[in-house]
Amino acid sequence: MSQRHPLASNSALEITIDKILKNTEKDILSNIKSALDDSHHNLDDSIRKLEHEYDKVISNGKKEADKIEKQIVGSADIETRNKQLLLLEDAVDKVFSKALDQISNVDRSGDYSNLIKSLLKESTQILGTSEITVFTNAKDKDVVQSALSQFSGAELSSDTIDCLGGIIAKSKDGTMKFDNTLDARIERLKPLIRKEIASTFGVGS
Amino acid sequence: MTAEGGVQYSKIAEIKGPLVVVDDVDSAAFDELVEIETNEGERRLGKVLEVGNGKAVVQVFEGTSGLSIAGTNAKFVGKVMEMPVSKEVLGRVFDGLGRPKDGLPDPIADKFVDINGEPMNPEQREYPKDFIQTGVSVIDGLMTLIRGQKLPIFSGSGMSHNLLAAQIARQASVVGKQDDFAVVFVAIGVQYSEAEYFRRSLEESGALKRSVLFLNTADDPAIERIITPRVALTVAEYLAFDLGMHVLVIMTDMTNYAEALREISAAREEVPGRKGYPGYLYTDLSTIYERAGKLKGRKGSVTQIPILSMPSDDITHPIPDLTGYITEGQIVVGRDLFRQGVYPPINILSSLSRLMKDGIGEGSTRADHSEVSNQVYDAYSRAQEVRALAGIVGKAGLTEIDLKYMEVGDIFEKEFLTQATDENRTIEETLDLMWKIVSKLPKNEITKIKDKYVDQYYKGE
């Protein structure tokens, strides 16, 4: 009796095909599942990356915005302050020129002659000698001349100088000079006077 | 300030370099301010260097060119040089002698202060221990700047120290506190283009309103440079100790200051010291650097970053050498990194902040800062050794761990050290970058950081 080859049977073939199909289906499903898992995983990763990138973009944007805000506010502040400074200086100059006008027209009698005496005394002390030549303006010539009687060795120069008032003392050998004019004194005190004027405008301490 | 002026002398005995010798002077004082009046009525400032035997030696800040013995007068003002100070100086630009350079009037002075300052009583000094964020990772992370510290930058000619200086001036801040912060920027003998860059850079970034600029350009008389840092530090001290601000003083370039000092010393025919600099260079530099610090019971602080370009990149040159003795560490700008195009090209292995340890950690920066910084130093040092080895045996002869260190070195330079000139990194960003570098190493190579920080921040495999 001859035996039949199993593959010759249709049912065996079908069984085999079924098996292969099942295995293939299983593989495909497993692959699909793993692909799905991978996709989920990738998606999760991408979301994390995206969130990270989003945070980075927002943070960089915020930094840039802060920088621009600083620039705009800083420039505006400086510009405003500079304008304020120029206006203040203008006002200070006006006050100064008015005060100088008043000083140049001050009455040359009374206290003024005492002032000239004290300026002469200070000058001889600082120069260390009373052997001096004194220079003054045309308006003060008489006051200075009368004050000089108290300083032996001092003489008034016939040349006049251009100043608001006060004197310049020069040693007779010409090596030392002391400027004690009102202009020089005001110039030396100008920073303090500016501060006083500015404080009346509410600037500074 | 008084209305009383000084005596004007007209007997000039000699004009020698930047010095004028005045004869028959009987009442001058050391350091007294002198107004020199030329034949044409031009006025220049100077100060008394020596007095005695009826003579006074006057150092003319604006130079002696054009002066003649006949017709020149010297007026001894009767006071030392003073700087008018007030809060109004913020946002202003001055020249090397403290005169406005921005077309605006003199600031309204709150008071007038001797530019030589008063020495800080050592007993009254407070130990510096608060962090200043510069926004530059390599400085904040590895050589942290502390309030009240003096931390110089040693650079070389042509390198990017001025870019770095301007970046620090724009970005520096005190983190997490509402304290006022100011920058005093002192340019000593810089080119006009550089001075303009500093001014524009602060103006455009909006940082000018909290800054004061003193600009002495290369074409200004060299002798003026002796005064520039002193005038600037006087303003800094006022802002710090009278107004309670934290002031960062950036001075560039201190080499030009020392050159000016050498010029005067030569004119005075003093015995020269090393490389012709005067023997008192150390003492003189200390009168500038020691004006940094904090005082007990006072809110503010003066922090200094002097920048000096080392002639021929020689760190043993008298200027960096003597500076290093006085200051508290140094930041060294490296020629190799500069040539590779790295900015800022700071060579961390030669750099150090001696006060860093007291100003970082929990409560200041972050608890892991000190340890991660040590690990980065160690890793970069190993990377440099491996690079040297690779130069001899080739990459093929390196072990796997050697290659890792080489990679760490590259990442350090490309991602941590390299930074854009307008990139302001927070200390957290800096520390995260340091962890990124450390995380490239296997865990068993991390030997300088506690496990708890490794568990918290390590991002490696």
Image (cartoon, rainbow, N blue to C red):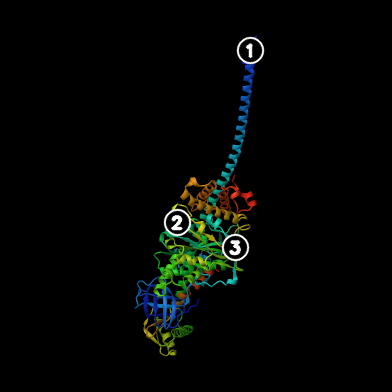
Q: Residue furthest top?
A: A1
| Residue on which the image places disc 3 | B129
Q: Identify the subunit bearing mark 1.
A: A
Residue marked by disc 2: B335
- Residue ID at (53%, 53%): B382
Gap between marks 3 and 2 measured at Cα: 31 Å
Say which of A13 and B166 sits in front.
A13
Residue B283 percent location from the top left of the image: 49, 71
* Residue A162 in sight here: no
Q: Provide the residue designation for mark 1.
A: A4
Q: CA distance from mark 3 to mark 1?
A: 97 Å
Using the image, name the chain to which the residue with label 3 belongs: B
Kindly identify the amino acid type of the residue bearing the numbered disc 3: Lys
Q: Amino acid at mark 1?
A: Arg
Q: At label 2, which amino acid type do we have? A: Arg
Q: Are marks 3 and 2 on the same chain?
A: yes
Mark 2 secondary-structure assignment: helix
Q: Earlier in the sequence, mark 3 or mark 2?
A: 3
How many residues crowd mark 1 within 10 Å: few (<14), some (14–19), many (20+)? few
Q: Secondary structure at mark 3?
A: loop
